[in-house]
Image (cartoon, rainbow, N blue to C red):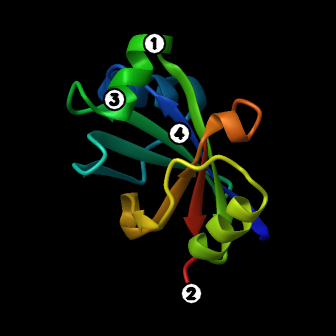
Amino acid sequence: MQVTRIDQIAIAVEDLDEALAFYERAFGLTAEYRERVDSDGVEEAMLNVSGVWLQLLQATREDSPIAKYLARNGPGLHHLGFGVRSVQDSLDHLESQDVRLIDTAPRPGGGGHTVAFVHPKGTGGVLVELVEDEH
């Protein structure tokens, strides 16, 4: 397995519009796009910071992972996304290393990407998303 880049730093927010207004006012960052990902129960906004995405995530339903995270922890850093050449190869490698996974198979994610999540109990407390590089 080879990590090719940091794809994203994801932040859970209570109100996406308020968060976007803050990041624009405070840091001059604007969303390049917004998307609703119904399968994950989120609306996301992506802000490009020199090739690394700052992903702001707002829950769209109470049973979504982001809603549960916000209920436990409040707003803040949610996960780190690593670009990889192949999500499936990366999952196979991690499984061979006895790393705990959330997703055992690649699945569709935001922006049309193929993704999978690695459990924070397997990574020293950091939720990691594997994001397949575009071929």
Describe the element under mark 3 as helix, strand or loop. helix
**Residue depicted at 65% across the width and 76% down the height:** 89
Residue 44: assigned label: none
State the quadrant of the N terminus: bottom right
| Front of the two marks 4 and 1 | 1
Mark nearer the N terminus (1 vs 3):
3
- Residue at mark 2: 135
Mark nearer the N terminus (3 vs 4):
3
Q: Residues within 10 Å of mark 1 (few under 14, many from 20)?
A: few
Q: Decide which of 87, 31 is in the foreground and name it.
A: 87
Q: Quadrant of residue 71?
A: top left
| Front of the two marks 3 and 4 | 3
56 with respect to 18 (left or right): right
Mark nearer the N terminus (4 vs 1):
4
Mark pair 3, 2: CA separation:
31 Å
Q: Quadrant of residue 91?
A: bottom right
Mark nearer the N terminus (1 vs 2):
1
Asked if marks 3 and 2 touch (Cβ < 8 Å), the reply is no
Give, as a three-letter code, the residue at label 2. Answer: His
Residue 16: assigned label: 3
On screen, residue 84 above or below 130: below
Q: Residues within 10 Å of mark 4 (few under 14, many from 20)?
A: some
State the image coordinates of residue 90 (x, y, percent, origin top left): 67, 68
Residue 72: assigned label: 1
Mark pair 4, 1: CA separation:
28 Å
Residue 29: assigned label: 4
State the image coordinates of residue 28 (x, y, percent, origin top left): 55, 35
| Front of the two marks 3 and 2 | 2
Mark nearer the N terminus (3 vs 2):
3
106 with respect to 133 (left or right): left
State the image coordinates of residue 46 (x, y, percent, origin top left): 45, 48
Describe the element under mark 2 as helix, strand or loop. loop
